[in-house]
């Protein structure tokens, strides 16, 4: 049996809008195995993005526990949460979040530059650049190093965002609708790239998607329902797409 990389137990999360409390996560449990490619599906507004943010320490649950390799991470200090996001979790989103004034290589390097002191960056800049170049080669963008985001297609921007997310060698990649702004063919290429990274490098991935065809390519799928996750079968995925 594969080791558990991430375990969530009895998570609750609500948001307040004026005097109205909106429950999102309601006693949610989830286990994620090391090296697993897990897809999270569900209706719009069901809490998929909230769950990713809570798992990745971008937000805190109201109650419950999150364990990373057996160590609790939902209640750690801000500095430790920053370290986790820098070194353990990688994030890719639907809207890329590339800086328009920087070229592709600079965008990939930027997170490393931000989290390094001047002296640390001076000592490690060549190593970081070598890794960035290798990643951009891996995602098929070695010919676009000096191009700015406005000169790229949607698929190329998402590939750059994937390379940026992988620069720090994360253990777990959290992908929130990474194909949502892409046409079907380009979206399939992005998912194929993520699948290759999962199989060849052992990268653990949790991906939110609304597309059942994409979800079928994962090792396992769960569905957000009433603030919890439940297993969903291939037949049920087919019903979602029909």
Image: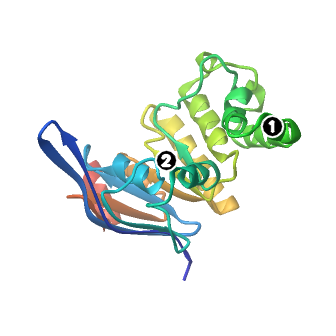
Tag 1 or tag 2, which sits nearer the N-term? Answer: 1
Q: Quadrant of residue 75?
A: bottom left
Question: In the image, is residue 128 above or below residue 236?
Answer: above
**Quadrant in the picture for the N terminus:** bottom right
Name the element at disc 1.
helix
Front in this rendered view, residue 25 or 149: 25
Q: CA distance from mark 2 to mark 1?
A: 28 Å
Q: Quadrant of residue 109?
A: top right
Q: Are marks 2 and 1 in contact (CB under 8 Å)?
A: no
Q: Is residue 17 left or right of residue 9?
A: left
How many marks can you see?
2
Where on the picture, by quarter, is residue 5? bottom right
Q: Write the residue at 77% across / 27% down.
A: 143
- Give the image location of residue 205, x and y in percent: 53, 57
Nearer the observer, 126 or 57: 57
Along the line of sight, which residue is nearer the eye, 38 or 84? 84
Q: Residue at position x 83%, y 37% from top?
A: 119
Q: Which residue is mark 1?
A: 121
Residue 104 lies, in percent from the top left, at 69, 27
What residue lies at 26% left-to-right and 43% top-to-bottom?
44
Circle 2 sits on which residue? Answer: 175
Compared across the picture, whether 42 is left or right of 8 comes to left
Query: Which residue is painted at 49% across and 63% down in the image?
Result: 73
Q: Farthest residue to the bottom: give it.
A: 1
Tell me if 83 is positioned left or right of 185 in this view.
right
**Element type where label 2 sits in the image:** strand
């Amino acid at each position: 049996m594969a080791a558990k990389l991430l375990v969530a137990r009895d998570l609750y999360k609500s948001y307040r809008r004026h005097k109205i409390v909106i429950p999102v996560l309601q006693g949610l449990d989830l286990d994620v195995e090391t090296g697993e490619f897990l897809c999270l599906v569900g209706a719009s507004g069901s809490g998929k993005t909230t769950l990713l943010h809570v798992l990745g320490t971008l937000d805190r649950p109201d109650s419950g526990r999150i364990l990373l390799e057996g160590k609790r991470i939902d209640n750690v200090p801000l500095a430790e949460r920053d370290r986790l996001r820098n070194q353990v979790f990688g994030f890719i989103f639907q809207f890329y979040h590339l800086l328009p004034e920087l070229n592709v290589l600079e965008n990939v390097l930027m997170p490393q530059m931000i989290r390094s002191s001047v002296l640390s960056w001076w000592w490690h800049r060549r190593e970081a650049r070598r890794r960035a170049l290798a990643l951009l080669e891996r995602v098929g963008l070695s010919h676009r190093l000096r191009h700015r985001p406005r000169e790229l297609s949607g698929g190329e921007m998402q590939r750059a965002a994937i390379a940026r997310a992988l620069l720090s060698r994360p253990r777990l990649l959290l992908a929130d609708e990474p194909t949502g702004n892409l046409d079907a063919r380009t979206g399939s290429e992005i998912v194929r790239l993520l699948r290759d990274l999962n199989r060849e490098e052992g990268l653990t991935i949790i991906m939110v998607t609304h597309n059942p065809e994409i979800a079928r390519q994962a090792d396992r799928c769960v569905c957000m329902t009433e603030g919890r996750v439940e297993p969903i079968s291939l037949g049920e995925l087919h019903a979602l797409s029909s």
